[in-house]
Image (cartoon, rainbow, N blue to C red):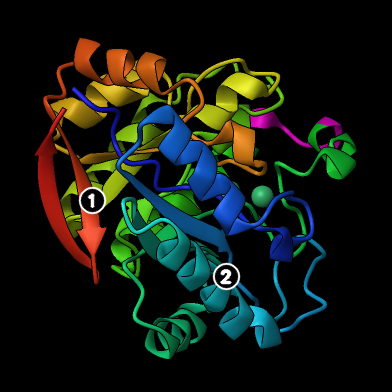
């Protein structure tokens, strides 16, 4: 069985990734992958919002880079997508982004729990010390649930991202997961198994096993993503991710073409 599509990877336009889309595609071909998707960090309504995404004026350049990779590697299916930050109030902006190019899918991610704290930013790790972990997780999952309910996204990204630095609340987070997964199932949205977590302090795929078991029980579809920020990270730890998905009961994965979903055997 070939490895599933790697639907989450970045480009240097986001200012914290290395290698051109053609380099990512070359690595995918080397690994024997048959499908990948670029999902770089989308522009914000204001270019000075933060410093880890493409500028609005670079959106066409981004699409051109992905098109060049498609042309260079016709044997590989290469999807055009974005990882879009969900912030309450940004819905119209996200709809406008969606209308600008023929995207295959949007990954909706929550990195910001307030207006200015991106909880996965290592430069802001000290913020975690000022706050109660359960309050942060609760605020995060409240937004993630809203992201699913918005129906603006085909896939929800790295669903248990707050575990990145290994800071976990003492409280049971199952009710937060349940509420999010119920909304996700109802909205017809997928979640991704994101292997980048294995490369972080938490040393675990996003989301963890308990979370994924719940997701499977609630029939929430899955995709796979390396969240590669360098060409050699494409497809990284995919065998482990597939084994995890199968072990909790998943038998299929999905992919997207022009924002339409198709299921594939896992
Ligand atoms: Zn990134
Ligand atoms: Zn992300």
Percent across and percent down for residue 75 are 31, 51
**Of 256 and 213, the residue lying toward us:** 256
Name which of mark 2 and mark 1 comes first in the sequence.
Answer: 2
Circle nearer the viewer, 2 or 1: 2
Can you give x and y, in whole percent of width and height, for residue 83 in the image?
51, 60
Q: Residue at x 49, y 48 (%)?
A: 25
- Which region is colored magenta? 129-133
| Residue tagged 1 | 255
Q: Quadrant of the C terminus?
A: top left
Q: Main secondary structure of the magenta part?
A: helix
Do tag 2 and tag 1 residues touch (Cβ < 8 Å)? no
Which quadrant of the view contains residue 45? Answer: bottom right
- The image shows residue 164 at horizontal and vertical percentages of 65, 29
Image point (36%, 34%), residue name: 177
Whether residue 87 is situated above or below residue 247 in the rendered picture: below
Q: Is residue 27 magenta?
A: no
171 w.r.t. 262: above or below: above
Q: In the picture, which quadrant includes the N terminus?
A: top left
SS type, badge 1: strand
User: Tag on residue 65?
Assistant: 2
The residue located at (15%, 17%) in the rendering is: 249
Q: Is residue 130 magenta?
A: yes
x, y (%) of residue 35? 32, 46
Q: Nearer the viewer, residue 29 or 176?
A: 29
Give the spatial CA distance, label 2 vs label 1: 21 Å
Relative to residue 56, is residue 262 depicted above or below?
above
Pick the residue in front: 259 or 110.
259
Q: Nearer the viewer, residue 213 or 76?
A: 76
- Near mark 2 (Cα within 10 A), the count class, few <14, some 14-19 or many ≥20, is some
Would residue 168 be seen by someone viewing this image from the given angle? no
């Amino acid at each position: 069985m070939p490895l599933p599509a790697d639907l989450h990877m970045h480009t240097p336009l986001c200012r914290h990734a290395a290698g051109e889309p053609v380099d990512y595609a070359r690595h995918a071909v080397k690994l024997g992958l048959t499908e990948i998707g670029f999902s770089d960090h989308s522009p914000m309504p204001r270019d000075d919002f933060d410093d880890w995404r493409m500028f609005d004026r670079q959106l066409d350049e981004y699409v051109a880079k992905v098109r060049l990779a498609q042309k260079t590697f016709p044997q590989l299916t290469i999807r055009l997508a974005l990882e879009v930050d969900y912030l309450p109030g940004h819905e119209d902006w996200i709809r406008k982004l969606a209308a600008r190019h023929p995207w295959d899918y949007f990954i909706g991610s929550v990195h910001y729990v307030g207006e200015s704290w991106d909880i996965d930013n290592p430069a802001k790790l000290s913020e975690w010390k000022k706050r109660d972990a359960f309050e942060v997780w609760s605020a995060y999952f409240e937004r993630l649930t809203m992201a699913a309910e918005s129906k603006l996204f085909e896939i929800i990204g790295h669903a248990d991202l707050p575990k990145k630095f290994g800071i976990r609340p003492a409280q049971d987070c199952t009710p937060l997961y349940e509420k999010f997964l119920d909304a996700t199932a109802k909205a017809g949205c997928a979640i991704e198994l994101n292997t980048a977590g294995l490369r972080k302090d938490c040393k675990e795929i996003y989301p963890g096993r308990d979370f994924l078991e719940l997701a499977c029980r609630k029939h929430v579809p899955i995709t796979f993503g390396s969240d590669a920020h360098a060409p050699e990270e494409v497809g990284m730890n995919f065998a482990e991710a597939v084994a995890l998905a199968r072990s909790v009961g998943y038998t299929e994965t999905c992919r997207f073409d022009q924002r339409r979903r198709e299921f594939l055997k896992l």
